[in-house]
């Protein structure tokens, strides 16, 4: 007996669709959008970060979890490598996150990310609408201004 999964099914082919470059504060990173949820504000991404990429300091307004497929990440609680899973609770702040080697990871984000300037003021907010704009071809700098 077949189940009706209408509205639940979905597949993103690894070899189909392009990667999207990110802008200021996330330069060098590229994303492949896996899921966007207008209902919850959640989104899932594959993220490619070349060796030496540093991500701007930010606050997680909702929880997020990450699974490192290859490479590694240095962040506020230490060094995470391929096969490691990371969790950020809502309200977490961390300074810049760096990638000491080419890194590919899965990110499940359950609320906006609030990126900060060096002086601690808000630079921009990245949410599902920002990610959607990027996926749909918006210039990264224009998309972040609307976030």
Image (cartoon, rainbow, N blue to C red):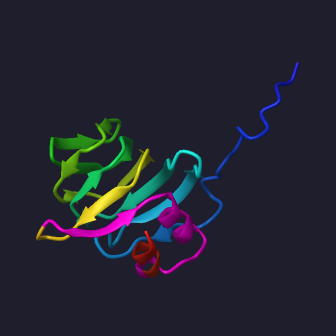
Q: In the picture shown, does residue 86 fall above or below 146? A: above
Instruction: Locate residue 83, reporting x and y percent.
Output: 35, 36
Quadrant of residue 87 within the rendered picture: top left
Instruction: Locate residue 23, reporting x and y percent.
Output: 37, 75
Q: In the picture shown, does residue 100 fall above or below 145? A: above
Instruction: Locate residue 73, reporting x and y percent.
Output: 25, 50
The residue depicted at 14 percent of the width and 65 percent of the height is: 120
Q: In the picture shown, does residue 48 fall above or below 27? A: above
Position of 19 with respect to 99 (left or right) is right
The residue depicted at 65 percent of the width and 60 percent of the height is: 16
Q: Nearer the viewer, residue 82 or 4?
A: 4
Is the C terminus in the top left, top right, bottom left or bottom right quadrant? bottom left
The residue depicted at 50 percent of the width and 69 percent of the height is: 20
Q: Nearer the viewer, residue 77 or 92?
A: 92
Answer whether residue 133 is magenta in the image.
Answer: yes
Q: In the picture shown, does residue 23 fall above or below 6? A: below
The residue depicted at 88 percent of the width and 18 percent of the height is: 1
Instruction: Locate residue 54, reporting x and y percent.
Output: 23, 64
Position of 94 with respect to 124 (left or right) is left
Position of 105 with respect to 78 (left or right) is right
Q: How many marks?
A: 0
Answer whether residue 79 is magenta in the image.
Answer: no
Quadrant of residue 24 within the rendered picture: bottom left
Magenta-tinted stretch: 120-141
């Amino acid at each position: 007996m077949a189940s009706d999964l209408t509205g639940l099914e979905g597949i993103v082919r690894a070899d189909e669709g392009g990667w999207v470059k990110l802008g200021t504060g996330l330069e060098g990173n590229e994303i492949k959008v896996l899921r966007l949820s207008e209902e919850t504000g959640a989104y899932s991404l594959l993220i490619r970060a070349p060796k030496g990429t540093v991500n701007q300091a930010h606050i997680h307004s909702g929880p997020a979890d990450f699974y490192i497929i290859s490479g590694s990440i240095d962040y506020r609680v230490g060094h995470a490598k391929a096969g490691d899973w990371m969790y950020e609770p809502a309200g977490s702040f961390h300074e810049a996150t760096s990638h000491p080697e080419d890194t590919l990871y899965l990110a499940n984000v359950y609320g906006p990310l609030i990126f900060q300037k060096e002086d601690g003021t808000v630079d921009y907010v990245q949410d599902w609408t920002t990610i959607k704009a990027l996926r749909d071809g918006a210039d990264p700098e224009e998309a972040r201004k609307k976030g």
